[in-house]
Image (tube, rainbow, N blue to C red):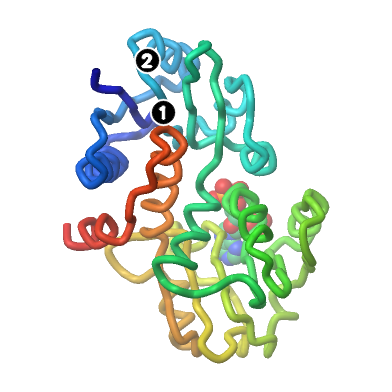
Amino acid sequence: MTDRYAVIGNPIAHSKSPAIHAAFARQTGQDLTYEAILGPLDGFVACVRQFMRDGGKGMNVTVPFKIQAVELADRLTERARHAQAVNTLKFEADGSILGDNTDGVGMVRDIRDVLGVPIAGRRVLLLGAGGAARGVLLPLLEEGPAGLVIANRTPEKAEQLKALCPGRGEVDVARFDELGGQGFDVVINATSASLGGEGIALPAGIYGAGALAYDMVYGDRPTPFMLQAREQGAARVSDGLGMLVGQAAESFYLWRRVRPDTAPVIAMLRAC
Ligand code: ATR
């Protein structure tokens, strides 16, 4: 029987997830359907339960329901607990719901495996201390960077994020104006500045030789952060389209135990 999956969010019309999962299913020969569901703002839980009753096997959860999904899940993976956000639900055979968060590992695999930039043993700068930064922190630390610095416009929030760190590696906090000349290997923009069309006030010298600047945001054009990174000497820049496909691949793996190849799907989306 064909298994059913879906993404739930509000708004949802422009979600790329159905196209991504359809491509994964074709690539791996898995028999499944994947649809987009507009979740009512006051009816997320009822909508998920209805999809379960209708025979759904799992869902992706996107804005604005990722935190409600934490409450809904009967069990959480460690990375979802740490992120305090769930982007993947797996409906188990016993009727229970597992909540996972694949955003961080999707980004890490995009950087490491698709872009070919190692994180292990490298100096990493994480810009931002909101939900997006929190979602990637544990998977980044699990790669074993030589050091990870969190910098945020409001320094207290960076301190709060550091305090939540699970003791898996060295984490420091810095103000933006303290970053000058530090020469990081990987700089990740987890702020929402690019969404507002803004750059970030960063000093010169944050990019070391061969450094990657990675923006979690994606769009038709390079983001302000990417443009600024090129000017400031980053050897490579990337948007977050590969993270989007990467998180989808990890959800697919959780559900199907088959890991799709993300590179051709990223290329397909870029060509659209
Ligand atoms: P998200 O869930 O996308 O992380 P959030 O929790 O609202 O959203 O966090 C937004 C992050 O982007 C914060 O780290 C914010 O910095 P502050 O804590 O100082 O508000 C950061 N941010 C947003 N606009 C920014 C800008 N123009 N320059 C620098 N940082 C910015």
Please provide percent x and percent y for residue 124. Answer: 64, 72
User: In this figure, which residue is indicated by the disc labeled 2?
Assistant: 51
Above or below, comparing residue 216 to residue 97 in the picture: below
Q: Crowding near pointer 1: few (<14 within 10 Å), some, many (20+)?
A: many
Quadrant of the drawing holding the C terminus: bottom left
The answer to whether mark 2 is within 8 Å of ligand 1 is: no
Q: Crowding near pointer 2: few (<14 within 10 Å), some, many (20+)?
A: some
Q: Residue at x 70, y 67 (%)?
A: 151
On the rendering, which quadrant does ligand 1 occupy?
bottom right
Please give the label number shown on residue 27: none
Front one among 34 and 158: 34
Residue 60, image quadrant: top left
User: In this figure, which residue is indicated by the disc labeled 1?
Assistant: 59
Above or below, comparing residue 51 to residue 152 in the picture: above
Q: Amino acid at mark 1?
A: Met
Q: Residue furthest left?
A: 272
Please provide percent x and percent y for residue 109. Answer: 48, 60
Left-right relation of 220 to 176: left
| Mark nearer the N terminus (2 vs 1) | 2
Kindly check if marks 2 and 1 are in contact, taking CB atoms under 8 A apart as contact: yes
Q: Amino acid at mark 2?
A: Phe
Q: Residue at x 36, y 31 (%)?
A: 7
Left-right relation of 126 to 265: right
Please provide percent x and percent y for residue 78. Answer: 67, 39
Q: Residue at x 59, y 88 (%)?
A: 208
* Badge 1 element: strand
